[in-house]
Amino acid sequence: MSDLPLDLVEEILSRVPATSLKRLRSTCRRWNALLKDRRFTEKHFHKAPKESRVLMLKEYRVFPISVNLKVTPPSVDFKGALGYSHSNSEQVVITEVFHCDGLLLCTTNDDRLVVWNPCLGETKWIQLKVDYRRYVSIFALGYIQNNESCRSYKILWTWYSYDYNSSPPQRGLGFEIYEFSSDSSWRVLDDVNHDSVVNHNSIIRSGVSLKGNTYMLAYDIEENSKFLLMFDFTTERLKRLCLPHFQDVGEMDLSVREEQLSVLNWSRITSKMEIWITNNFDTEATLLWKRVHLDSQCNCVRIFSSLYFDEEKKVVLYCNVKDGETSKKVVYIIGEDDGHYIEIPFVKSIKIERLQLIHTTRWYSLIFNYVPSLFQIQ
């Protein structure tokens, strides 16, 4: 291929899967330079076949999992944990993960964030504020695109504070942003909520990334209602969007697969589950939802995370605490006709020695769709 014109080489390589293409970085200087070109990586992301994988945060590490729907009951097989490039990777404890187009934003137990591209083995560590532990925090990764179609990544920090000395106790709600391009400190967003789409009595849950923006579920305590929030990383503002009309609003969760946003609703009254999906993301219009009915029942305590895994067979994967056993975490595979679950070995705590101290950190299961990409961390 060395005799071919560069534009033809670029067109050919833009259709090669990311996991295969990364092996070429060390074979040719010209190809290595091309694969690092931000314009090419954007082109590759849209043209190359998507190597969709399912990942799960389990016991402080990220595991690929294989789901076999051709056997009865369906099976879940855990592969080896994804590795790090950090020199002290064996001591890194991941408590939360947020996925954005091949990049993982991981929260660790030592008050740091790390952005990680498992495909390229690249990481970027970000220091949190000194008073970070004073707040209940949610982090999300997103991006904006400039005129050259190059991405500029940002991190949104949503935090809560509580003043129990006041009567009645007061809640605070704030938003801050971190920009990779400036590599500066956290910047307070004063006008993010300019339309008052949320108030200080709203509870926001960790969300999902789609086309650069973040979608989050929120709950208004005063109105006793749930709604959908979208944070636009370009305008740095929130927008309130409609959820589907549920007959009985229960435990809810968001997931993304193949540029479709899915919302799962599990009724505590009927124990039935339903899925609604949309691929209409015109932020100026009302979202158009399509219902996928699952005639299955399950007994949950709490749904940690879910993934609408197979649209043709109407299969959902989700993690929760097994009913009646608060120390048992399981993965459920729910289909249109019947439901099965695979139990995951539960680890109550892992002792990690750092600076002659022993820390015990809680972890929550998280299951999500992942597509390897060549996007470099700025």
Image (tube, rainbow, N blue to C red):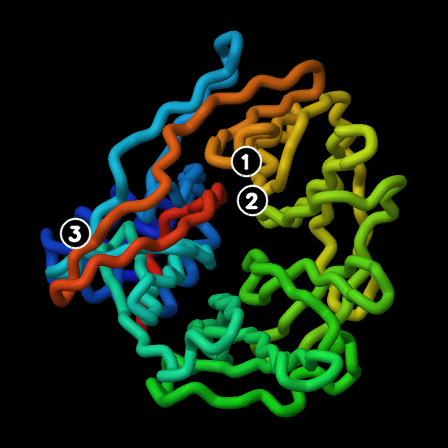
Q: Position of residue 141 (x, y in %)?
A: 47, 67
Closer to the N terminus: mark 1 or mark 2?
2
Q: Nearer the viewer, mark 1 or mark 2?
A: 1
Q: Is 356 left or right of 74, judged from the image as shown?
A: left
Residue at 78% across, 58% down: 226
Please state which of residues 198 and 33 is positioned toward the viewer in this rendering. Answer: 198
Please state which of residues 114 and 95 is positioned toward the viewer in this rendering. Answer: 95
Q: Dot 1 corresponds to which residue?
A: 321
Please state which of residues 357 and 91 is positioned toward the viewer in this rendering. Answer: 357
Q: Is residue 373 above or below residue 30?
A: above
Question: Are there few (<14), some (14-19), or many (20+) residues within 10 Å of tag 3?
Answer: few
Marks 1/3: CA–CA distance: 27 Å
Q: Position of residue 251 (x, y in %)?
A: 71, 44
Q: Is residue 179 above or below residue 44?
A: below
Give the amino acid at mark 2: Phe
Marks 1/2: CA–CA distance: 8 Å
Q: Is 2 left or right of 149, judged from the image as shown?
A: left
Residue at 18% across, 47% down: 23
Q: Is residue 219 visible?
A: yes
Q: Label 2: state its secondary structure.
A: strand
Question: Are there few (<14), some (14-19), or many (20+) residues within 10 Å of tag 1?
Answer: many
Residue at 35% across, 68% down: 113
Q: Label 1: state its secondary structure.
A: strand
Give the amino acid at mark 3: Glu
Closer to the N terminus: mark 1 or mark 3?
3
Question: Are there few (<14), some (14-19), or many (20+) residues within 10 Å of tag 2?
Answer: some
Q: Residues at badges 1 and 2 in contact (C-beta under 8 Å)? A: yes
Q: Is residue 30 visible?
A: no
Marks 3/2: CA–CA distance: 26 Å
Q: Dot 2 corresponds to which residue?
A: 304
